[in-house]
Each structure stands twice: as C-alpha cells, then as structure tokens.
Amino acid sequence: MQATGLCKWYYPTSQPSVHVLEDCSFDIEPGRLTVLVGVSGCGKSTLACILGGYLRPDAGTLTIDGRPIEGASPDRIMVFQETALWHWMTVLDNVLFGPLALSSMTKAEAKAKAIALLTKFGLLDFKDKYPGQLSGGMKRRVELAQALINSPALMILDEPFRGLDVMTRELMQEYYLKLFEETRLTTLFITSDLDEAIFLADRVLVLSGTPAKIVNAFEVDLPYPRTFQALISERYLAIKENLMRALYGHGTPEATVLG
C-alpha cells in the first residue's frame, strides 16, 4: 500500500474547522508488521479509517498493488479499538458472518475454516458462547479470527489491545506476534504505547501532532522470536530513546535503523 500527500479536514457544525492530516505520505511493505505510533489525538484513527476505506481524504492518493482505493473492501480488514462483535450471535456465527455475507465461499467451506481458526486461537470450546460470556482477551481473539477468515491482503489494527488489563494486553501482544511470524500477513498496527510499538514492529512510522504527517520511519532491528525479556535489554533502551526523540520532535525525517 502506498499513500501520497493525504490531507483531511473536519468541519464540525458551529465550530472552527480542524486540520487533521497534511501531506501525509508513506508505504506499507508486504509481509511486514508496520507500527504507526503517535501521541493521543494526533489523527491515528482518522488515518486508519482512510486506509480502510471508511473515510475519504480531502486530497492525496492511496493505492494497493497499484490500484486506487476508493472505499472499504475485504482485501483490507480493520480491527477497531472497541469490540465489533454482534452480541446476539455466537462466537462461531460471528466468525462466519463475513464470508457468508460476501458469498466468498460455501457455508461448508466457511465453517471448516472457522473451526480451524477457532482451534488455532484456543476458542473451539467457546464456539457456541456469546460475546457477553467471554473475557476481553477472548473477544479480541474472536475478532482476529473474524478478520483472518476473509484472508485480507492488509490487516489494520487500531489500538486493538487498548483497555485490556496489563497482563492480558501483554499476552495478546505475544499472541499476535506469534500469529504474524507464522503467517507474515501484511499488518499495520496503530498504537500510542512505545513499548508495544517496539516489541511488535519490523518498522515504525512516526506520526506528528496535528495537522499530522509521517515525520520519521524506523527499522526495528530486534531478533525474532521476541519475548518480553527484550524490553530490559540495552538494545531496547537505545531503540526507545531514539523513538522518543523522533516522536517528540527531536528526530530527523530520514529513515533510520533503530538500535
């Protein structure tokens, strides 16, 4: 995916216009886990919704595999901050909904794939439960299965672990990282948590304050497989220092290898 010169304004009723994005340009490389990091309120979710096709930019271009993005599509699946599960549907029916609504596979094919995903995510015994009967971490796993069953070309996760308790959040970070290492699914992960960004990322994009644009791009040179022991290493501390300088206006706009 490539974004060039994206701009976005909001025009709230009876209030001054808000300039959210200005000349925002970057690319998301196939088969890599790219993390977009920025302070709260800087426009991360707005940018995510533009990439997902839920909002139109006021200027600029957005393409995937050379094709212009003109709206939402199953090739780009977004996992939002808040749960998007249908509370009146079982876990299995939530996962089946996408492919059945799109008629992208037969019901038998969709069910077989859903069962395989729920087994992989440790949720098979909960397939007949409802979202209200699940923990926060389990709901997030169902939403990942709900997204992956559609075989997207790009997964967009907008602060998906926000609001979880610390232990569950760390478990979900490890869980998604293992999933990524197995699938190499092209991923854009959005967060304001620097530890989360460094732990997960192959590459970090740094978003400035509003009007927001990409002010730095870093390669994170930490070995795989990653565990949380990496967060107490000297290399991690050097990475975090460089990232903080970039995030708070002391970095340079050139791409850099963190470390």
Image (cartoon, rainbow, N blue to C red):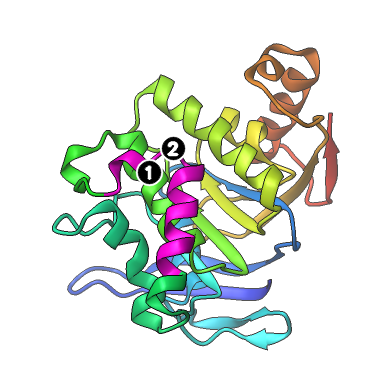
**Any mark on residue 96, and which?**
none
What x and y, as percent, mark residue 177?
Answer: 62, 38
Closer to the camera in the image, 159 or 251: 159
Residue 113: say if magenta.
Answer: yes
- Work out whether residue 240 can be spotted: yes
Closer to the camera in the image, 201 or 91: 91
| Label 2 close to label 1 by CB (< 8 Å) | yes
Residue 245: say if magenta.
Answer: no
Q: CA distance from mark 2 to mark 1?
A: 6 Å
Q: Quadrant of the C terminus?
A: top right
Closer to the camera in the image, 232 or 37: 232
Closer to the camera in the image, 239 or 110: 110
Q: Which residue is mark 1?
A: 124
Label 2: how many Cα within 10 Å (few below 14, some 14–19, many 20+)? few
**Residues shaded magenta:** 110-127
Q: Taking 159 as reference, is 6 left or right?
A: right
Most common SS among magenta residues:
helix
Q: Which residue is mark 2?
A: 122
Q: Taking 140 as reference, is 225 left or right?
A: right
Q: Secondary structure at mark 2?
A: loop
Residue at the image position 41 percent from the left and 72 percent from the top: 108
Q: Quadrant of the N terminus?
A: bottom right
Measured along the vertical axis of the image, is residue 184 above or below residue 124? Answer: below
